[in-house]
Image: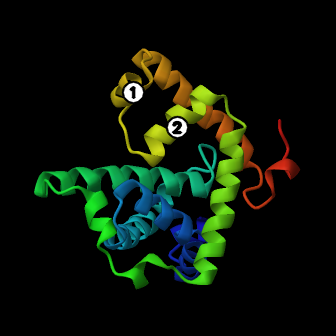
Amino acid sequence: MQAMAAGDAGALAAFYDRHSPLVYATCVRMLGDRTTADELLVDIFHEFWQRASLYDAAKSNPVTFLLTLTRSRAIDRRRTIGKRSNLKLATESQTTNAADQHPTALDGVIASENAGIVREALSLLDPEQRRAIECAYYDGLSHSEIADLLKKPLGTVKTYIRQGLIRLRGCLRNDVDAPIEDRDTE
C-alpha cells in the first residue's frame, strides 16, 4: 500500500494480479452481469490506485479496504443500471457469450482459493451474523431490507453485521495468506 501511495505502478500491478479475481467474482455476484462486472473492475482498481494514500493500516487490511470499495461501487452501479433500465440483470447474464463465462484456469484457481478463505472465515461466524453479512455484501441489500428479510429489528441487524465484520477482520487480518487454521486467534 505504501508503494502504491508513492506511485509505484508495479505494486498496483502485483496487487491487481493477486486480488482482481476476488473483486471480479464479487462484482459478478452482485451485478449478475459479466460485462458490467468487467467495466466495474477497472473502475474499482483505478479508484483504489487514486485512494491508496488514504489507506490506514490501523483500520483494515488492504483486501478489506478493497472489498469495501468493491461492495460500495457495485451497489452504486446496480442502482444506476436500475434507473436506466427495467430489465433484470439476471436475464442479461443468461444471454452473455459462452466464452465470457469461462475465466482462465489461473483466474479460476485464484478466485477459488480466495473465495475458500473467505467462506471458511464466514463459517466461523454465528449463523445470524453470517446471513446478515451475506445479504449485505453478496446480495447488496440495505440494512433495512435485511431487517425485513430476516424479520429482525434494524438495530439487531446492524449489530449482527458489525460484530460479524469485526470477527471476520480478526480471522483475516493478521495473515491474509495463511490458512485460517494456521492464523492466530487473539
Task: Quarter of the image for the N terminus: give it.
Answer: bottom right
| Above or below 148: residue 29 | below
Crowding near the residue tagged with mark 2, few <14, some 14–19, many ≥20 C-alpha atoms within 10 Å: many
x, y percent for residue 165: 59, 36
Residue placed most toward the observer, 56 or 165: 165
Left or right relative to 47: residue 1:
right
What amino acid is found at the position of numbered circle 2 in the picture?
Ile
Left or right relative to 106: residue 47:
left
Question: Looking at the image, do the residues carrying marks 2 and 1 touch, with CB atoms under 8 Å apart?
Answer: no
Q: Which residue is mark 1?
A: 149
- Name the residue: 23% across, 50% down: 79
Crowding near the residue tagged with mark 1, few <14, some 14–19, many ≥20 C-alpha atoms within 10 Å: few
**Residue 92 in view (yes/no):** yes
Q: Earlier in the sequence, mark 2 or mark 1?
A: 2
- The image's mark for residue 81 is none
**Residue 163 in view (yes/no):** no
Q: CA distance from mark 2 to mark 1?
A: 13 Å
Camera-side mark, 2 or 1: 1
- Name the residue: 69% across, 65% down: 113
Left or right relative to 19: residue 157:
left
x, y percent for residue 119: 66, 49
x, y percent for residue 146: 40, 29
x, y percent for residue 62: 59, 57
Circle 1 SS class? helix
Residue placed most toward the observer, 64 or 95: 95
Circle 2 SS class? helix
Total of numbered circles in the picture?
A: 2
- Name the residue: 70% across, 55% down: 117
- Name the residue: 51% across, 57% down: 66
What amino acid is found at the position of numbered circle 1 in the picture?
Leu
Q: Which residue is mark 2?
A: 133
Task: Quarter of the image for the C terminus: give it.
Answer: top right
